[in-house]
Image: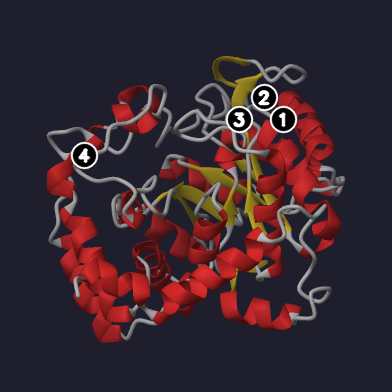
Amino acid sequence: MNTKRTLELNRRGLLLAAGTLAAAANVSGAHAQTADQQGGSADTAISEIGRRKLGSLEVSSVGLGVQNMSRTYQQTVPTRPEMHNIIRTAFDRGLTFYDAAEAYGPHEVERILGEGVEPFRDQIAIATKFGWNIDLETGERKPGLNSRPEHIKLVVEGMLKRLRTDRIDLLYQHRVDPQMPIEDVAGAVKDLMTEGKVLHWGLSEMGLNTLRRAHAALPVTAVQSEYSMLWRGPEKAAIPVCEELGIGFVPWSPLGVGFLNGAIDARTRFAPGDIRAIETRFSPGNLPHNLALVELLKVWAERKQARLGQIALAWLMAQKPWLVPIPGTTQMAHMIENIGAPTIRFTPSDIAELNASVSAIEIRGARLPDAVQVYSDVEAPLRS
């Protein structure tokens, strides 16, 4: 029997299929019930997924990124009831960490998330982000960035309404504004904390000097940056700085925009508007070479009787105990698969072997188009 067929028939695959069918049966309901309402145990669900700390903020060991719940990479629009069902089923299974942003939609993803988590808002942590230049009322994207203190405060008022809540558990600056000293940004967030509207703050894709300055001005809870087997850049400096300062790390795109769960192969061609079409790591010249990483995952998936994406997430979580990945999805089966990753166990020798194998594969091509990459690793100006 070939490897693919073996994986389809393994025990984890059968459990996943059963869970997917059970979850799908809830779609027609007004909302998914909590684990206690279903006759199960919420404590059991939480223990299976596990808990981790980002600074002083405790969350489930895997989160849910909801970026594509208003529009997918392929530019399709998911059905709103099904997105609510995924959000609520994730909670039923122990997930307590949801990640959104003003820029996703823009605005619409925050609305979807607010609607979805309303029945259990007080039992979860919501993260969202400000920083792009987006019209407060219409959501129209305007050029550049905007982290002016007065603007941040108005953005948060809109977020609270869309999320149907009175506070944001973790508020990130989405990208560093090259026109605004980070100390001024921290001051605005501190004011919001004093008002009880924000509980923790963080930065995303920032320059490392800016991170140090931000943390000195107002202790940072978490950093969010791309990190996966496909992109290991944060290992060079960002993760060591976070470890030094006691800051948690939240990898976005921990499955390499679908690459690490086998959704992309050498024949894949992307739909118009799909950002992956202009990422050179997925170009026809580079993709066949980079697929060596997927072949490695297949070997480990068979070895651990798991799915490819579960191996990729479990590997990531094994790197640091204060790292919480936020895989995004618009498919129930994938969500259930992703939150099963914490059950995968690696021995120290497993990790040493897998790290060596991953390091031996040189990924060709850039992780982002130049027009997007230019917003990463930016340093905020000094106060004049």
> Which residue was labeled with disc 3?
103
In front of the other: 262 or 373: 262
Mark number displayed over residue 148: 2
| Other-residue count near label 2 (Cα within 10 Å), few / some / many at <14 / 14–19 / ≥20 | some
Return the disc, 2 or 3, that comes first in the chain's sequence.
3
> Which residue was labeled with disc 1?
152
Residue 55, visible in the rendered structure: no
Identify the residue at image location x=77%, y=18%: 137
Would you say 210 lies left or right of 347 here? right
User: From the viewer's perspective, is the residue at label 1 or at label 4 nearer?
Assistant: 4
* Real-space CA distance between mark 1 and mark 4, rounded to the nearest whole angstrom: 44 Å
Residue 56 vertical position relative to residue 212 in the rendered view, above or below: below
User: From the viewer's perspective, is the residue at label 1 or at label 3 nearer?
Assistant: 3
User: From the viewer's perspective, is the residue at label 2 or at label 3 nearer?
Assistant: 3
In front of the other: 269 or 342: 269
Return the disc, 1 or 3, that comes first in the chain's sequence.
3
The reply to whether callout 1 and callout 4 are in contact (CB within 8 Å) is no
> Which residue was labeled with disc 4?
267
The reply to whether callout 2 and callout 1 are in contact (CB within 8 Å) is yes
Secondary structure at badge 1 equals helix
Mark number displayed over residue 104: none
* Real-space CA distance between mark 2 and mark 3, rounded to the nearest whole angstrom: 16 Å
In front of the other: 297 or 333: 333
Question: Hey, what amino acid is under mark 3?
Answer: Ala
Question: Hey, what amino acid is under mark 2?
Answer: Arg
User: From the viewer's perspective, is the residue at label 4 or at label 2 nearer?
Assistant: 4
* Real-space CA distance between mark 3 and mark 4, rounded to the nearest whole angstrom: 31 Å
Secondary structure at badge 4 equals loop
Question: Hey, what amino acid is under mark 1?
Answer: Ile
